[in-house]
Amino acid sequence: MKLLSIIWMHRWILFATTMVDIKSRFRGTVIGLLWTVIYPILFLGIYAVIYIMIFHVRAAGYKTEEYVLLVFCGLVPFLGFSEALGTGVGSILANKGLIKNTLFPIELVPVKAVLSSSVTMIVGLGLLLAALWISGVWHFTQFLVPVILILQLLFSIGLIWLLSAFNVFIQDIGQIVAIFIMFLMLVSPIAYTHEMIPKELMPFMYPNPLYYLIMLYRDALYIGTVRVDMLMIFSVIAATMFLIGGAVFFRLKPLFADHV
């Protein structure tokens, strides 16, 4: 509750600085904030061409356009997670001047990094929902997407708290994360459904939090059913990561000034 109260207490400062971060990412560009719309469209389009037209990946029982939407249901949240991970790990070192700042607590820096990095994903989810509705795919479970999004943000914030704190002392973590993101893209069920996963590989899926996250998004957005067990498991994972990440960050925070 202390972690949440700190975020809530400084919510307006957090909102304002997050908006500054978002605007600064596109400062100097010709089309500015329109990149938040164009980027997910280009990324998803490239992914669709590679997996469908080059690799000829298909899912039994789905037409090509249906499979594209199915893939996007898993790709959009992965895009948001990977962007938050890549940006957030080095957020403390990138904001050394705030370590002793009392107006903006340093623990909010990783939170700000996650929120600003999630804008592309949120826009992508909006575009995806519009494409699903145009295609005639509409389910009441789509109203659960904000719940899944909040769980994803909690999980991401906890993980970034943990990794950004360790990165102050072991800066190799920033390099490892870049490789780890590519590995996660291969082992996460983005381009294949649950039925396409061999039974022999399922034991490797269960320890992967993104397996539950992607399946929850896909089921809620496209399939129209949400497995309560998977929702509960990921809720526990998100809450646990949030608590562990926050506890480690607060424990190591007093040592940051001596190592930056």
Image: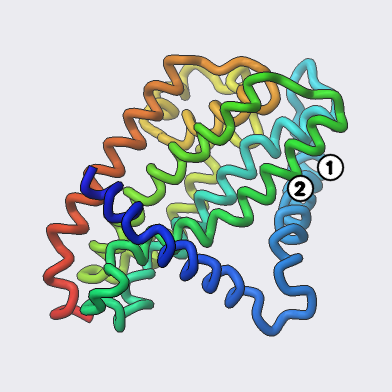
The quadrant in which the C terminus is found is: bottom left
- Looking at the picture, the colour scheme in use is rainbow
Q: Residue at x 73, y 49 (%)?
A: 44
Q: Which mark is residue 50?
A: 2
Q: Residue at x 21, y 79 (%)?
A: 100
Can you tell which quarter of the image residue 96 is in? Answer: bottom left
Q: Residue at x 49, y 33 (%)?
A: 213
Q: Is residue 150 above or below residue 163?
A: above
Name which residue type carries label 2.
Ile
| Image position, residue 161 (x, y; %) | 30, 56
Q: Residue at x 67, y 28 (%)?
A: 221
Q: Is residue 74 above or below residue 173?
A: above
Can you tell which quarter of the image residue 236 is in? Answer: top left
Q: Is residue 193 visible?
A: no
| Image position, residue 62 (x, y; %) | 80, 21
Q: Give the alpha-carbon distance from disc 2 to disc 1, as whole Å.
A: 6 Å
Can you tell which quarter of the image residue 255 is in? Answer: bottom left
The quadrant in which the N terminus is found is: top left
In what element is the residue under mark 2? helix
Name which residue type carries label 1.
Met
Viewer-side residue, 62 vs 125: 125
The residue singled out by tag 1 in the image is 53
Asked whether the residues under the numbered discs 2 and 1 touch, taking CB atoms below 8 Å apart as contact, a structural biologist would say yes
155 sits to left or right of 66: left
Q: Is residue 221 visible?
A: yes
The crowding category of the residue bearing disc 2, from other C-alpha atoms within 10 Å (few below 14, some 14 to 19, many at least 20), is few
Q: Is residue 61 above or below residue 94?
A: above
68 sits to left or right of 255: right
